[in-house]
Image (cartoon, rainbow, N blue to C red):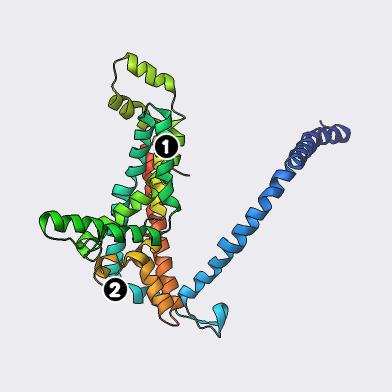
Amino acid sequence: METPVQGSLMKTHHREPAVFAKKNKWSKLKRYLPVYALFVPVLVYYAIFHYAPMVGVIIAFKKYTFLDGIFGSSWVGLAHFKRFIQNGDFWIVFRNTLVLAFYRIAFGFPAPILFALLLHEMRFARWRRLFQTISYLPHFVSWVVVYALMYNFFSETGFINAHLKAWWGYTLPFLSSADYFRTMFVGSAIWKEMGWNAIIFLAALTRVDPDLYEAASMDGAGRLQRMWHITLPGIRSVISIMFILSLGGILSVSFEQILVMINPQVASVAEVIDYYIYRVGLLNTNNYSYATAVGLFRSVIALMLVLIANSLAKKIDEEGGIW
């Protein structure tokens, strides 16, 4: 039978490891306090500019008026969402958004991967660095400047049409026809961001073990075979993560690009959800609740796409998902 003294000793022995662990945790925390202090401004920035504005999302469920404010305005439930879905513009802007997003994913996502693979296969390091540096430059140019370049090349009096008229006697409405808008939209986006987006894939390629290439060469594998069986599997997890992140913004079809490229001739295929929010929320008065509801609708659809893509990536590759 356990005596009171023995019980007291046992409790003391049980407390000692807990007290020691607590002191150990505090000593570790104290050691990294300067590092945690550096994180505080970042935490404050995100709290103020990214999380605090999310309170304003509730006006999507209210009839917001400036005088009553966010919390004083009356509730209307899902009325703004029903208005958007029942609106005749819904299917037009939703279809345009999905089509442009699909083209961006289908053609814009593989482009930096292929470009990174080409740079990785270049033998001369000096030429590789030169091409890599040149490919970064369009990223730092605004869409206004990009459209000015496009206008000089593809307008009715531009460089391309001037040569088409001189050689074959006709011109093509590249910038003023709905038939060419999607091609010009995706092509200009690829040209602008391909080099910049390739940085992550180039960094991932440096992690591939060079011994695997030597072993494959000794077995007689060609360049394409090495690329297919070694390089691409080596960066597969990075590709899947970047693909999921791309799906997160799939419905946010480059608003700045749409704003500079849209005109009455191409509006039927160019007006997307982001531009629709701008048109009904800012150009028209007192439509803030409706515009917020449309933006929230777009965010929910994007979140669902990310969740589906993440689960598919986890099924294909255990290390492929984000979480």
Crowding around mark 2 (Cα neighbors within 10 Å: few <14, some 14 to 19, many 20+) is some
Q: Is residue 212 above or below residue 158?
A: above
User: In screen coordinates, is 275 left or right of 166?
Assistant: right
Q: Residue furthest front?
A: 166
Residue 286 drawn at (x, y percent): 45, 82
Name the quadrant containing residue 291. bottom left
Label ID, residue 23: none
* Residue to which mark 2 is pinned: 89
Residue 96 drawn at (x, y percent): 28, 63
Q: Is residue 81 above or below residue 15?
A: below
Which image quarter is the N terminus in? Answer: top right
Residue 90 visible somewhere in the drawing: yes
Looking at the image, which is closer to me, 157 or 214?
157
Q: Residue furthest right?
A: 5
The amino acid at mark 1 is Leu
Between disc 1 and disc 2, whose residue precedes? Answer: 2
Q: Residue furthest top?
A: 218
Label ID, residue 130: 1
Which residue is pictured at 30% across the width and 59% down the height? 152
The amino acid at mark 2 is Asp
Describe the element under mark 1 as helix, strand or loop: helix
Name the quadrant containing residue 17. top right
